[in-house]
Image (cartoon, rainbow, N blue to C red):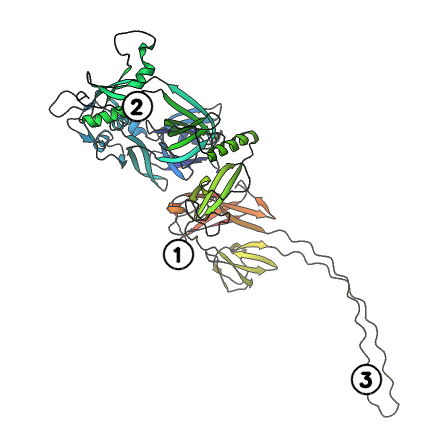
Amino acid sequence: MIIYFANRYMSIMGVASTDLPDAYALQHDIKTIDIDSGVATFEMELVYTDSTHLKAKEQAAVGNYILRYHNEDFEVYTIIEAEDDSEKGTIYIYAEDAGLDLLNEVVQPYTATEAKTVAWYVEKFTRDSGWEIGINEITDRIRTLSWDGSATAAERVRSVATQFDAEIGYSFDIDKLSIKHKYIDIYAHRGHDTAMELRLGREVKKIVERTSIANLATCLRVTGGTPEGSNTPINLIGYTYDDGDIYIDQTYGDLKSRTALEKWSRYLSESGTGDGHIVGQYSYDTTSQAELCSHAVSQLQKQREPAINYDVEMYYLPTTLKIGDEARIIDDAGELYLSARLLETEERVTDDIYKATFGDFLIKGSGISEKVQELAEKYAELAKTRTLYTWIAYADNASGGGISTDPTGKAYIGIAPNRVTETPDLTDPTVYTWSYTEGGTGPAGTSFRNKGAWAASTAYVSNSEYIDVVTYNGNSYACITSHTSGSTFDSSKWSLMASAGATGATGATGATGATGSTGATGQTGQTGATGATGATGKTGATGATGATGATGADGYMIAIDSTSGLVFKNSYGTTILTALIYQGGVELDASGTQFSYSWKKFDKNGNRDTTFSATTKAISVTASDVDTKAVYEVEVNW
C-alpha cells in the first residue's frame, strides 16, 4: 500500500508506504465504506522522527489530499482531522472521499414546484463544488421533493438518493497522480450477485449475528406524492391488494401483515379494543397507487421480521467483492446458509484485519448438496490442523478451459487459497479464482555484444538494443555511454564486469632427454661421405604443473528490479524500479546511501528524455509515464 500526500494544488509532497524503503512509515490504517452513505473513510497513523517531524506535519495538514494506492486501485481522500502526538511520534489522520466541498458546504431548505430528475437535484445542491455526475442508472425517474431544514451538501445528496430509491458512491478520474474529475455515481442498486462462497474456516474467521426489532412493524400507514392541482398526497384507500399475508385495510388504506400480527401483536400478553398492530410510517413519491403499493409491500416484507445483520471477520477480503455485492455465507457447524449483501467493509492492511457487515439476507435451506457437505467436513478438519496450501493453475479462458499447471500459452491464472492438499486438483476449475494475465508483447531486451579487445578510434554503443563488451588489460568491461574511443582507454565510459586474476607461477623445467648414439667414423684420407645422423633421443618426461594463480576479485553486477514486471496492462498501474548492486552474490548498498545513482530515460525511439532525472536508489514509474515503450538506465558510482 502506498500513500501519496498532496497539497490543495494537487502537488505531491511526500510518500508513506508499507513497502517502500525510503518512504514514511504508517501504522493502524483503517479504510471503511458503507452502502448507506456511499462515503469511504480512511484513518492512519503517520510515523515520524525528530528530523522528519516538521515535514510530516506539513504533509498531514488538514485540507490536504491523500491518494491511496492498493491492489492496483487509486482512491482519493481529503484530510478532515489530524492529531499530532509528540510523545508517540505519530500523526493520526482521519480523511473522507466526499471532501470539504460536500462535507462543509451548507445548503438551505428547498421545495420543488414540479417533478425533477435525480440529476437535476444533485447538480443543484453540488453547484460549484467541483463534483459532477458520473454513473446515473435512474435517468427515467422524476420526483417532487422538499426539505424543511438546512443540511450539508453531502447529507442533501444522500437524502435525494434515498427519496429516489437509489444508492450513491464517489469515484475519481486520476491521471499522473492528478485528479481530472470527481464523480458522484448514482445506482439503482449498487453491486451485483457474485455467487461467491465465503466459508467459516476458509475466507471467514468468525461470524457475529446481530438481531434487532427497533424498526419492526406489522402495519404500514402509507402515503404517496401529491397530484398536480391537489394539496393532499395519495394513499391506498380504494386500491385492492391481498397476497394471503399482506393486504390493504380499506379503513385508512393501511398495509397489514397477518403472519406478523400473529407473532408480534401487543395483545398476545394484554387486552385491548384494537387489533394490536405495530404501526409504522412509509412514504414514496409517486402519484400511482399501483407503484406506491408495490414499494410499500417490499418495505413491509422487510419490517415485519427482526432485522438481522452479520458481522464477518475475514482472513482476507477478496478483491473482486465490492460494496453492495451479494455473496453466500456458509457455516456448516452452525447450519447457517444464506445469501447476503455486503453493506459495510473495514480493511486494516498494516494490522492484517478485514471485517465485513452483511445484511438484506436470504436464509437458505439446510439441505445442501453432498459436495458442499463434503467441503464442510474438509474445512472442519482444516480448522484442527491449520495446514493450508495455495493452488495455482493456468487456463485458456475465465471459466478454466484447458486447465493445466503449465503456464505455457495460457492467458489466465487461477488461484485457490487455503486448500487442504498440496497438489492442485484440476478436475474442478470452479474452485479457482481466474484472472486475465496475458499482456501485450513486452519491449525487446538489451543484448551484450562482444567486441573483443578494446581498440582506439572505434565506435562503441550502449543503448536499448546493444551494450558493447570489450577486454582491456585482461579485464572485461561493459560500455555505459555510446562513444568513439580516443587514443587511450577512458574508464568513465565503461563499467568493470570481471577482473583478470594474477598470473600463475612458472612450472618446473622438464628433465633432459637421453643422448642419441654416435655415428660410425669414416676412413682417413679422402674425405668420405658424411655419416648418417644418429636417431633423436627420447623426449624427457613432462614437468609438473605449476601452482594455480590467485583468484581475481569478483566483479560488480548491476540489475534493475521492477515490482510489477515490465508491462502495464490496460495502460494502467504503477511499478517501483530499484537499482540492485551485487559483488560475489552479495547485495551492496541495500539502504541506497553508500553509492550515488543517476537515472536516465529513453523513449520508444531510443531518444533520451532530457526532462527526466532521478538520483535515488528506487524510482516510481506509472503507466502514464510510458508512451508505448520506455527504457530506464541507471549509472552507479562508488
**Residue on which disc 3 sits:** 532
Return the disc, 1 or 3, that comes first in the chain's sequence. 3
Question: Which mark's residue is nearer the viewer, 1 or 2?
Answer: 2
Which residue extends farthest left?
A: 229
Mark 3 element type: loop
Q: Which mark is residue 301?
A: 2
Location of residue 70 in the rendering, given as x and y in whole percent from the top left corner: 42, 37
Residue 116 visible in rendering: yes
The answer for how far apart the CA atoms under marks 1 and 2 are is 66 Å
The type of residue carrying mark 1 is Asn
Q: Which mark is residue 605?
A: 1
The type of residue carrying mark 3 is Ala
Q: Are marks 1 and 3 in contact (CB under 8 Å)?
A: no
Location of residue 35 in the rendering, given as x and y in whole percent from the top left corner: 34, 28
Q: Are marks 3 and 2 in contact (CB under 8 Å)?
A: no
Compared to residue 265, the image places residue 62 above or below, namely: below
Question: Which mark's residue is nearer the viewer, 3 or 2?
Answer: 2
Return the disc, 1 or 2, that comes first in the chain's sequence. 2
Residue name at image x 67 percent, y 53 percent:
551
Q: Quadrant of residue 313?
A: top left
Mark 2 element type: helix
Compared to residue 289, the image places residue 183 above or below, namely: below
Residue name at image x 56 percent, y 50 percent:
557
Q: Label 3 neighbourhood size at 10 Å, few (<14), some (14-19), many (20+)?
A: few
Residue 4 visible in rendering: no
Between 343 and 397, which is closer to the camera in this rendering?
397
